[in-house]
Amino acid sequence: MIFSLLGKRVEARALGAPSLPSAAADFRGKGGIAKLSIFLVALLITPITAQAQHPSAGSGQAFDGAKAYEYAREFAAIGPRWPTGPGHVKAEDFLRSHFQRNHDQLEQDAFTADTPIGSVPMCNFIVRFSGTKPGAIVLATHYETNYPLRNINFVGANDGASTTGLLMAIADRLRAEAAVSPGKKLSGYSVWLVFFDGEEAIRQWSASDSTYGSRHLAAKWGRDGTLGQIKAFLLADMIGDKDLDIQRDTNSTAWLVSLVAEAAKKFGYQRYFFQQEMDVQDDHLAFVERGVPSIDIIDLDYGPNNSYHHTAQDTMDKISAHSLTIDGDVFLETIRLIDQRN
Ligand code: 1BN
Ligand code: ZN
């Protein structure tokens, strides 16, 4: 399959996964009904621990994808959020006031980006939840919308808003977990949520005209030694899509890809993950280049022939609470697996 994105052609390779991944596909053909009956009886009598665990596994509570969706809806309702535009200021205010209201540890990383239209003020937001172990896991997204699309009503429901909502709902979970823990700390590594500005190209995507926020923060954290604390960097991008199919990015760190696949498997979510592979350039690259174990969890197949991507059709009706539940369950389980790793 070939996607045409931002004027670039991105080639995707199918990884030989069955197109009908459900167990039902195995019961076609001779003796199928008998086998299906045996399978259903086995399902009924198999202890729950032996099956793919429903999202109550792990921390003991299903992820609230409806809450993530509601945050995304509020955020997308701000309207277009292109750098230098009025919606961008409102988006910054929204994030700032949300995390301040919740008394979270918020850092605002304001900087000036050198872009094809000149100097542009940008701001990354970092929200930190302290853990008992030394080191941190970073979960990241971008929140702004595309400057070249400023003259259409591009609200980026999937592209920016969905994963902003996802991280806000993850913050709710982390805050609640810390509140009931000894010393008000997460048990495990610290978790830092990062909302990047300036992921999108200002004129045309290139290494120097894109990912302004992540390149700025990776360089800054490289200079001040913060990168050395980061055990893993997980990027979420465009994974609110109702029709979720997350590609395996070939620039991502192999062990982290395996860990995310293991987390997905725990919930029986394998069919949504890594059926195709792609070379993806995104906000994780500045961290990959500096040796931080990193993964881009991204769905680059949005709508028929990718027709919703970077169009005014990227609206809330194209994303779902169910996809955000899958994402949240897998992110939280991946954190748990990284915590257990060493
Ligand atoms: C993601 C969302 N991107 C832009 N908006 C980056 C990207 C687009 C990466 C296409 C790979 C292909
Ligand atoms: Zn985009």
Image (tube, helix red, strand yellow):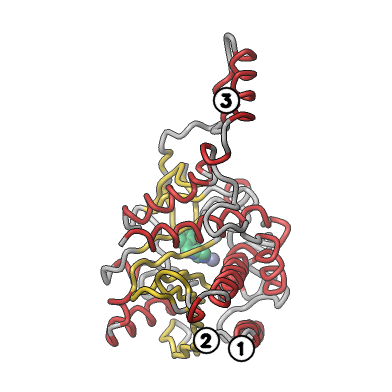
N-terminal-most mark, 2 or 1: 1
Q: Which residue is mark 2?
A: 106
Asked which quadrant contains residue 165, the reply is bottom right
Residue 12 point in image, percent of width and height: 43, 45
Decide: is 230 above or below 296: below
Residue occupying the point 64% across, 14% down: 33
Q: Which residue is mark 3?
A: 25
Q: Which amino acid, mark 1?
A: Gln
Asked which quadrant contains residue 290, the reply is bottom left
Label 2 neighbour load within 10 Å: few <14, some 14-19, many 20+: some
Residue occupying the point 43% across, 86% down: 113
Q: Which residue is mark 1?
A: 100
Label 3 neighbour load within 10 Å: few <14, some 14-19, many 20+: few
**Local secondary structure at mark 1:** helix
- Alpha carbons under labels 3 and 1: distance apart: 50 Å
Which residue occupies the extreme top position in the image?
30
Q: Are marks 3 and 1 in contact (CB under 8 Å)?
A: no
Can you see residue 83? Answer: yes
